[in-house]
């Protein structure tokens, strides 16, 4: 049973939050404390924050379609009509992308984004790779009996506690097989041998916290959908988990260091959140206009 938490303003660690913090303190400020800014209008910051990109939407659309696929499998094990499914993928890609504003267009790196030629082909490739992989028939054979216990892109932010600290670790797909819990995380981008195993340790900790299952019974896998289907297991032991907890405490304390009030999560002045010196990072940042680096 997944536990529920009352809202508190306390800062909560997540891999995306700390990655942004580590990348550029000013980007972190705009991303997580836009209401505190007195220089720029909140609506302006929110508009920039909502910008997406072609790589992000390839991943986003793929996740959304896989969610629909898995929830369909929970209802029926009937064979998938590949042609109809791919037409559904096309419609969803155009619908989802049609509601988005792209950073490439906003900053005039492109006149427009055509989802049908720039996003859909990779989404189709990712989904075909998943359908052709041995994982899907294995899932239908081994895990379908417990389909009512599957967690598919669960609602909320994946809140848990890591050694007493608030943290967010939202899984893509979790399901039991026998006395084990399997966790899958779908990736459409490149492998990241540092970030992705760290992310999976967060999911394992989340599953242990909510389900009380021994760490040795939790099996996390990163599933890369492009350029072909490939899975990467993340082996864990009690020393890995303790080291992970220590790391999360260290990273949380770093972010606390930029707060005026830890209990209310009130940040220090924006001037304390320095801009990165790495201008290459700026070229991918939604907020570079605010820093005069557009």
Image (spheres, grey):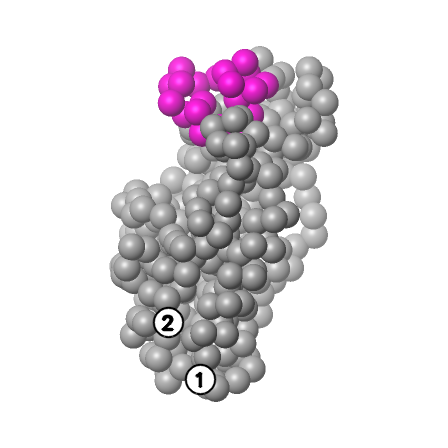
Query: Going by the image, does 168 lie left or right of 46?
Result: left
Report the side of 148 relative to 43 (left or right).
left
Q: Earlier in the sequence, mark 1 or mark 2?
A: 1
- Residue 75 horizontal/vertical position (percent): 56, 82
Residue 131, numbered circle: 2
The answer to which of 63 and 104 lies nearer the viewer is 104
Tell me where the magenta segment starts and ends, as one range: 272-294
**Which residue appears at 60% of the width and 44% of the height?**
100
Secondary structure under the numbered disc 1 in the rendered image? loop
Determine the residue positioned at 61% across, 48% down: 98
* Residue 209 falls inside the magenta stretch: no
- Classify 99 as above or below 222: above
Disc ID at residue 50: none
The location of residue 263, given as percent across then percent down, is 65, 34
Q: Under tag 2, what secondary structure?
A: helix
Determine which residue is flagged by label 1. Answer: 79
Q: Mark 2 packing: few (<14 Cα in 10 Å), some, or many (20+)?
A: some
Quadrant for the N terminus in the image: bottom right
Total of numbered circles in the picture?
Answer: 2
Image x and y of residue 63, in percent: 48, 58
Q: Main secondary structure of the magenta part?
A: loop
Q: Quadrant of residue 233?
A: bottom left
Residue 185 appears in the rendering: no
Between 259 and 272, the one lying in front of the other is 272
Q: Is residue 219 above or below residue 259?
A: below
């Amino acid at each position: 049973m997944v536990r529920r938490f009352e809202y508190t303003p306390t800062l909560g660690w997540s891999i995306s939050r700390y990655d942004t913090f580590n990348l550029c303190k000013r980007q972190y400020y705009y991303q997580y404390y836009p209401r505190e800014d007195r220089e720029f209008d909140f609506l302006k910051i929110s508009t920039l924050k909502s910008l997406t990109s072609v790589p992000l939407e390839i991943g986003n659309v793929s996740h959304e379609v896989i969610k629909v696929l898995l929830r369909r499998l929970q209802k029926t094990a009937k064979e998938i009509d590949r042609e109809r499914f791919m037409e559904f993928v096309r419609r969803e890609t155009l619908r989802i992308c049609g509601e988005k504003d792209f950073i490439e267009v906003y900053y005039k790196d492109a006149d427009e984004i055509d989802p049908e030629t720039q996003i859909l082909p990779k989404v189709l490739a990712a989904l075909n790779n998943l359908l052709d992989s041995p994982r899907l028939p294995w899932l239908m054979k081994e895990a379908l009996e417990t389909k009512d216990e599957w967690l598919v892109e669960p609602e909320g932010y994946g809140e848990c506690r890591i050694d007493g600290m608030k943290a967010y670790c939202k899984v893509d797909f979790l399901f039991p097989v026998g006395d084990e819990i399997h966790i899958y995380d779908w990736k459409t981008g490149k492998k990241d041998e540092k970030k992705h195993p760290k992310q999976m340790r967060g999911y394992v900790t989340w599953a242990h916290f909510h389900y009380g299952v021994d760490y040795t019974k939790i099996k996390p896998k990163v599933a890369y959908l492009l350029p072909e289907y490939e899975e990467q297991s993340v082996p864990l032991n009690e020393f890995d988990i303790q080291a992970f907890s220590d790391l999360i405490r260290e990273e949380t304390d770093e972010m606390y260091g930029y707060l005026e009030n830890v209990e209310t999560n009130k940040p220090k002045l924006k001037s304390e959140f320095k801009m990165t010196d790495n201008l290459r990072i700026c070229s991918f940042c939604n907020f570079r206009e605010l820093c005069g680096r557009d």
